[in-house]
Image: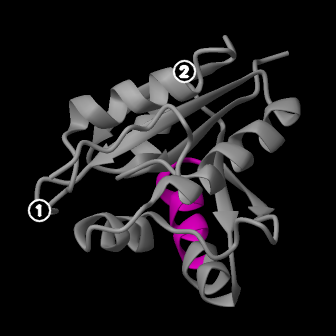
Amino acid sequence: MPQKIAVFPGSFDPITTGHVDLVERALPLFDKIIVAIGVNTQKQYLFSLEQRIQWLEDVFAHEDRIAVDYFENLTAHYCTRIGANFLLRGLRNASDFDYEKTISQLNHIVGNGIETIFLISQPAYSHISSTIVREIIKGGGDASPFIPGQVIIPAK
């Protein structure tokens, strides 16, 4: 029987407690989860790729079934290349569902049948997004309630 490998793609700019909760809740469903940073050369990131990889490795160091990687181009092509048969996505609200449903259908076609598994965010995390956390950081606020303890934001 082939391994059940899931990719949890995102920018993780930065990783949030909601991301961590999602991965930990999904772990019993898969043999391996690859938390993969999608690199978009057209996008401006607040934190470097190297910093984001280091944070992910630190956050998930306790679990050998979680790997950290990065990729360019299409997520579905990355999954095919590494032999992943599932995508893992979190849903915070109805807007997330509408967007993610469309993307999952396209990935299913482009990725030769890859299945997207959705987990609903726990209420304690449903208000957290990397976008909001970045705005807090840029505004000089304290983002620590929304990010794992291993993520230390350098003072500006």
Rendering coords of residue 94 (x, y %): 69, 88
Q: Identify the image quadrant of residue 131.
A: bottom left
SS class, disc 2: strand
Residue to which mark 2 is pinned = 67
45 and 115: which one is in front?
Answer: 45
Q: Taking 100 as reference, is 150 left or right?
A: left
Residue at x 51% of width, y 49% of height:
111
Q: Taking 112 as reference, is 23 left or right?
A: right
Bounds of the magenta segment: 102-113
SS class, disc 1: loop
Rendering coords of residue 146 (x, y %): 56, 58
Q: Quadrant of the N terminus?
A: top right
Residue to which mark 1 is pinned = 42
84 and 71: which one is in front?
Answer: 71
Q: How busy is the neighbourhood of tag 2: few (under 14 within 10 Å), some, or many (20 plus)?
A: some
Q: Taking 115 as reference, is 111 left or right?
A: left
Q: Main secondary structure of the magenta part?
A: helix
Q: Residue type at mark 1?
A: Gln
Distance from disc 2 to disc 1, alpha carbons, whole Å, reads: 26 Å
Rendering coords of residue 34 (x, y %): 56, 29
Q: Is residue 58 visible?
A: yes
Q: Is residue 113 visible?
A: no
